[in-house]
Each structure stands twice: as C-alpha cells, then as structure tokens.
Image (cartoon, rainbow, N blue to C red):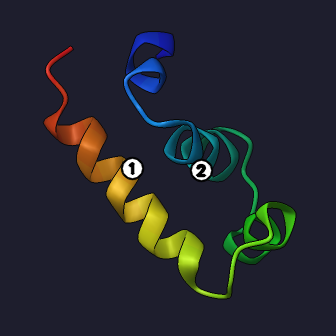
Amino acid sequence: MERALGALAPPLRRAISALCLEDAGLEQFERREGWPPRSAKVVLKLALAQLASARL
C-alpha cells in the first residue's frame, strides 16, 4: 500500500488516503483542503486512474 501511495503526487495521495482509507466524505475533504465544490471527485478519479496504470 505504501509503495502504491508513494507513486502518487502529494495532493492525489492525500485524496486517496482521506477518501478511501480514512472514510472522509467528498465535501468534508474539499473543505479541509480548501478546494472548490465537486473538485474532490475529479481528483479522486485522477488518483484512481494513476494507481490503476502504475507499474508497481
């Protein structure tokens, strides 16, 4: 798990950790990061796509 998360850029790593491992909600995570509404969903999609395509 650490190896996979280490392959991500810091904002993507924070999103995966908070939304998938810590069970935070999208809106809660957006507020915590100071991001605009609905942006966490886009970032989560990018992070999951990057993990899926990573050659670990």
Which mark sits nearer the N-terminus, 2 or 1? 2
- What is the number of the mark on residue 15? 2
In the rendered image, the quadrant that contains the C terminus is: top left
Residue at (57% x, 70% y) in the render: 40
Place residue 52 in its image quadrant.
top left
Q: Secondary structure at mark 1?
A: helix
* 40 left or right of 48 in image: right
* 50 left or right of 28 in image: left
Q: Secondary structure at mark 2?
A: helix
> Do tag 2 and tag 1 residues touch (Cβ < 8 Å)?
yes
- What is the residue that sits farthest to the bottom in this orientation? 37
Task: Give the answer, above or below, for where 53 lies relative to 20.
Answer: above
* 10 left or right of 29 in image: left
Give the percent coordinates (x, y) of residue 9. Answer: 46, 37
Residue at (75% x, 77% y) in the render: 27
Crowd class of label 1 (few under 14; some 14 to 19; many from 20; radius 10 Å): many
Task: Give the answer, above or below, for where 2 lies relative to 25.
Answer: above
Crowd class of label 2 (few under 14; some 14 to 19; many from 20; radius 10 Å): many
Place residue 33 in its image quadrant.
bottom right
Give the percent coordinates (x, y) of residue 14. Answer: 64, 42
Q: CA distance from mark 2 to mark 1?
A: 8 Å
The amino acid marked with disc number 1 is Ala
- What is the number of the mark on residue 47? 1
Residue at (46% x, 19% y) in the render: 6
Give the percent coordinates (x, y) of residue 5. Answer: 47, 25
In the image, 25 versus 33, the foreground residue is 33
Place residue 31 in its image quadrant.
bottom right
- What is the number of the mark on residue 8? none
